[in-house]
């Protein structure tokens, strides 16, 4: 009965069970998150490519891990429902570094974009290698590739690639600007990146819950359930926007953003 608030775990099954699409059920009473899920993020990316970018034919690749598989599955369901075609669906291993074999399978099918499920250590080199092999189409991924290191790994040919990430851009929110200024002043060596603000809001959600559950408490163990109950009722204006949770422990926020690599930056 120790609460956990994640700023970054996005698989829907963590909060709504293995059958989240048809029969959602709260999986862990102690688990909450401030980021939205892949069940929202995957379809969001599909709608962007199909409707906004006008791309009707894509290939998909995932890294066989839970995050990558789930993201591609959610993307594929929405993309095909919209009328798009997935011309090739492939996988790679999360420790692969040479992608010529999978590129040779994808290239002849003529996709206009590649949707990748996984993280930046694979996605960056994959983007670079596929373009070097003449598959000069944009790669799009989820929040797992939205990191400056993706651009460093992908090189100059990563320009034009896309990523989705949770929430609105931190540096475009008034509260986010204040947070980033304080973060810079504190002198941390690593950037706050995509999840710094969500981590901050996650910590403050726990602190707010403890302000309620610890009132009049004589010991910690006896108020663990009260802390869980209080966390479920938390509601405050955080760095990323309104922070509150639904009956599954998911954030009530459904805001997502599409980013594009331009001139070597997201």
Image (tube, helix red, strand yellow):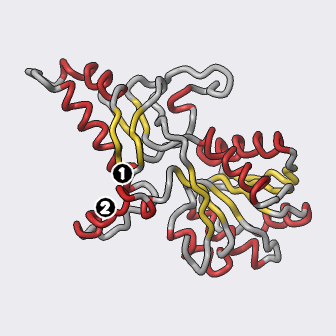
| Residue pointed to by mark 1 | 239
Q: What residue appears at the point 84 percent right and 50 percent down from the top-left corner?
A: 86
Q: Quadrant of the N terminus?
A: top left
Q: What residue appears at the point 37 percent right and 26 percent down from the top-left corner?
A: 232
Q: What residue appears at the point 69 percent right and 41 percent down from the top-left corner?
A: 74
CB contact under 8 Å: marks 1 and 2: yes
| Viewer-side residue, 43 vs 90 | 43
Tell me the crowding category of disc 2: few under 14, some 14 to 19, or many 20 or more residues within 10 angstroms, Cα based: few
Query: Where is residue 53 shown, x and y percent of the image?
Result: 76, 61
User: What is the number of the mark on residue 178?
Assistant: 2
The answer to whether residue 225 is above or below residue 149 is above
| Viewer-side residue, 170 vs 96 | 170
Q: Quadrant of the C terminus?
A: bottom right
Query: Where is residue 166 shown, x and y percent of the image?
Result: 52, 50
- When asked about the image quadrant of residue 243, the answer is top left
Q: CA distance from mark 1 to mark 2?
A: 8 Å
Tell me the crowding category of disc 1: few under 14, some 14 to 19, or many 20 or more residues within 10 angstroms, Cα based: many
User: What is the number of the mark on residue 221?
Assistant: none
Q: Please report whichever mark, 1 or 2, sits nearer to the chain's N-terminal start.
A: 2
- When asked about the image quadrant of residue 186, the answer is bottom left
Classify residue 169 as left or right of residue 101. left
The answer to whether residue 254 is above or below residue 134 is above
What element does badge 1 sit on? loop
Query: Where is residue 97 shown, x and y percent of the image?
Result: 64, 67
Q: What residue appears at the point 55 percent right and 54 percent down from the top-left corner?
A: 165
| Image mark count | 2
- When asked about the image quadrant of residue 195, the answer is bottom left
What element does badge 2 sit on? helix
């Amino acid at each position: 009965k120790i609460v956990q608030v994640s700023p970054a775990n996005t698989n829907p099954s963590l909060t709504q069970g293995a059958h989240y699409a048809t029969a959602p059920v709260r999986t862990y009473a102690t688990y909450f998150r401030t980021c939205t899920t892949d069940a929202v993020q995957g379809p969001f990316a599909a709608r962007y490519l199909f409707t906004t970018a006008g791309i009707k034919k894509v290939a998909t690749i995932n890294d066989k891990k839970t995050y990558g598989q789930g993201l591609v599955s959610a993307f594929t369901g929405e993309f095909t429902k919209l009328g798009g075609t997935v011309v090739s669906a492939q996988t790679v291993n999360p420790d692969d570094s040479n992608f010529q074999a999978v590129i040779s399978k994808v290239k002849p099918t003529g996709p206009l974009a590649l949707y990748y499920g996984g993280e930046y250590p694979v996605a960056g080199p994959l983007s670079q290698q596929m373009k070097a092999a003449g598959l000069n189409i944009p790669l799009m991924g989820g929040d797992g590739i939205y990191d400056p290191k993706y651009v460093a790994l992908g090189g100059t040919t990563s320009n034009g690639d896309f990523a989705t990430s949770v929430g609105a851009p931190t540096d475009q929110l008034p509260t986010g600007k204040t947070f980033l200024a304080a973060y810079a002043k504190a002198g941390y060596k690593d950037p706050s990146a995509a999840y710094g603000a969500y981590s901050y809001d996650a910590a403050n959600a726990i602190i707010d819950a403890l302000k309620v559950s610890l009132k009049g408490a004589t010991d910690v163990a006896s108020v663990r359930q009260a802390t869980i109950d209080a966390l479920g009722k938390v509601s405050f204006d955080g760095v990323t926007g309104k922070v509150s949770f639904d009956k599954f422990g998911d954030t009530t926020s459904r805001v997502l953003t599409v980013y594009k690599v331009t001139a070597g930056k997201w």
